[in-house]
Each structure stands twice: as structure tokens, then as C-alpha cells.
Image (cartoon, helix red, strand yellow):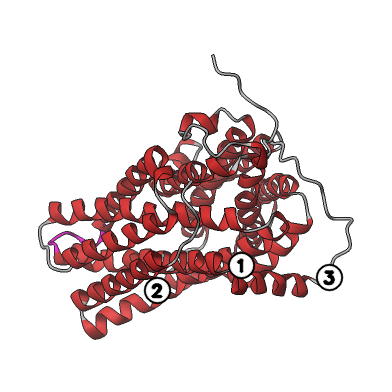
Amino acid sequence: MAQISNKPPAPETLSEDAKVPGFGDVLRNRNFLYLWLGQIFSQLPDKVFIILVIALMAAHFKEAGASMQSAFFVAHSMPAILFGSIAGVFVDRWSKKNVLVSSNIFRGLLVLLLPLFPDSFAFILLLTFLVSTLTQFFAPAETSAIPLILPRKDLLIANSLFTATMSVSIVFGFALGAPALALVGGADHGHWLVGGAYLVSGLILALVQTGEENNLAAEHTSPWADLKEGLDYIQGNKIVQAALIQLLVLYSLLAALNILSIRLTKKLGLQEEQFGFLLAATGVGFAIGTWGLGRYGQRFARNSLAATGSLVIALTLGLIAFVSNVWGVLALCVLMGSAAALVMAPMQTAIQEETPEDLRGKVFGLQNNVVNIASTVPLALAGIAVDLFGLRPVILGLSAVSLGAAFISQKTQLVKRT
């Protein structure tokens, strides 16, 4: 029986000729196992929290309508834009482990205290804003912790697993959120489920040993100077810059497709509310792609993986624009999801490999900010573009964007083969 390690390995002591790792190999590292379990118990309540708040508004505010729901989503999204970058600065100054644990504990307590506060919509918005703000600290701390507890050769497989878990949590969190709330007695009791999951995540993450030193007592420049340092590093490092561009394009495409899928279902003769089938097919493909990366991805250069993924996305979008068969489109969505995984995990890995430890929080905070903007703006523009130009031209336009990303990837040597 293989022994589970508990001490973060020193990347520089590991041989580059070591056996290519699999999912089982990285999960034998106890610290990574705890980090991964913490991710699961953190991301699932993130999704259920949204369902909980929508259900609470429907139950307690009879006048609740589209405007209230929009206000909720604005309160949920604004912290990512306002604090996404600056949160990374403080993640670099503080212990990543402490940030991971405290952000989940505080999120859990905020949700658990929900029944004690006034039954007002303003409080719901404030609670949503605070929970989302804490999430902005959790995200860069989690991404920064992975290279602290795993050697360089394990980063691709680790990011593949985290990416797969993220996609699965989206599917299961939104699909099972309502039934889960019903099991605990409905929306008025849902705070036990969501808050409890956050607390469980915090307790699991308290077991992680990152081997880092807490830099809180060290002298620092102003947060804005630190933020500029992160920006300067990105501007001066072509590898990180190229990887961020790839992620920006990918998240923008996926966000636009969330809106276009509603129109696409109507074109296929389905009900508009059945658009989830297309998103689910993409999620299945994403899981397949991350499994393939974990098994075979170490054999290929990062830029080749990203270029291949972007090229396949471009081809599948081009075909989707003309295919009118439901099963054909579903199959193409699976293929597109698999291709998206070839871009996301290798690009995240390239950034982790290239960024020094003392800059990771700043860089990942900026990345988190950029990704959130990239995931938000297309939601507003995609529907307008379809109204102006039609569904097929917009899909073909996205295909052209992905083709350009494939060309950029192939021309950029991100990192050497591992």
C-alpha cells in the first residue's frame, strides 16, 4: 500500500525524468488531497448559495421579479471587478493557508447567521456582496497554494483535476441545488446546508501544510504599488502574458456561448429552457478532456495543447453554425468541451510555473479580475450581436476569434516540454 506524504515536496529536488504522474499519484500527496477536498466543499455551496438566495427572494418578497434578480447578480458580480486584483496583493502578504481557511469560515458564519438578520432585500444584497468579496480572496490563494505543495512536474495533472472539479461542481451545484434545499426543509433552512459546507471546507483546509512563511509582519509598499508590480511582471513576461490572453479568449467564448445556446436550442426545434442540454454536453466534454490531459498531457508542449484546443473549438463552432440536427450539435458540444480543457489547464499551469512565489497572489488576483470581466461582458454583448447580425454570423465570428487564438498559441513557446 502506497504511503501518503504529508510534507510539501521541494520542486527543485525532483528529477525531470521521473515517471509521468497520474491523478492517483497527486492525490497520494495528503496536502493536495486536502486542498482538493476543500475545493469541492467550497465550490458546491458557491452554486447552491445562488439558488438559495433566488428561492428566498421568491418566498419572502412577493414583488420579486427580474429587477430584483438582476440586482442580486450585480451584487454577486461586483466584488470580482472591484476587489479581484487587490485581493491578490494581500494573498501575497498573508499565509495562503490562513486565507483559505478564514475565507471559508467567515463565509460559512455569514450564511449561518442569515435568520438572525432583518427580513429585507437590502440585507440580502449586502450578504451576497460580502460572501462574494471573501470569494475573491479564496480564489487566488487556492491557485497560489498548488505550486507550494506539488513539484513542477505534477502541476498539469493537478490543474486538470481542479479544472474538472470546477466544471463538475457547476453542473451538480446548479442541478442538485434545488433538490438539496428541499431535503433540508426548503429555502428557510438552506442556510444550514450552504453555511455548513463552507465550514467543512475551512476545517479540511486547516489540515493543509503549505510550508510557507507568513509575510504579514514584513515591510511592504502600498497595495497599489504591489498591484503595479504584478502588472509590470505580466507586461514583462511574454509567457504569462500569452497564457492570460488564451484564458481571456476562452472564458469570453464560453460566456458568449451560454447566451447563444438559448437561441441555438430554438433553432434546433427545442424549447428555449432546454438550453441546459447543450451546456451539459459541453461539461461532459470538459470532463473527458481533463481526463485525457491527466493521462497524456505531459507528453506535449503547453503551446501545442492550447493551439490544438483553440483550433478544435474553431472547427466545432464552424460546424455548429450549419448543423441543424440535435444529436449532431450535442456531439459537437462534447468535442468543444474537450478542446476547452486543452486550453484551460495547460495555460493555468504555464502561469503557475512561470510566476515567482512572491508574485503569485498578485498575478492570480489580476487573472481572476480579467477572467470575471471576460465572463461578464460577453453576456451583455452576445444577445445584442445576434439581434443585429443573426445567430450564424455571430457563431462564425466566435469561430474566427478561436482560430486567431490557435495561431497565437502555436507561435508562442510557453514552456519547454516536461
For mark 1, give the secondary structure. Answer: helix
Q: Earlier in the sequence, mark 1 or mark 3?
A: 3
Residue 227 in which image quadrant = bottom right
For mark 2, give the secondary structure. Answer: helix
- Mark number, residue 221: 3
Type of amino acid under label 3: Thr
The residue range painted magenta reads 268-273
- Mark number, residue 338: none
Dot 2 alpha-carbon crowd within 10 angstroms: few under 14, some 14 to 19, many 20 or more: many
Q: Position of residue 319 (x, y in %)?
A: 16, 64
Looking at the image, which residue sits at the far top?
1
In the picture of the structure, the residue carrying the numbered disc 2 is 378
Q: Position of residue 320 (x, y in %)?
A: 18, 64
Type of amino acid under label 2: Pro
Q: Earlier in the sequence, mark 2 or mark 1?
A: 1
Dot 3 alpha-carbon crowd within 10 angstroms: few under 14, some 14 to 19, many 20 or more: few
Relative height, residue 285 to residue 394 (above, below): above
335 or 377: nearer the viewer: 335
Q: Nearer the viewer, mark 3 or mark 2?
A: 3
Type of amino acid under label 1: Leu
In the picture of the structure, the residue carrying the numbered disc 1 is 366
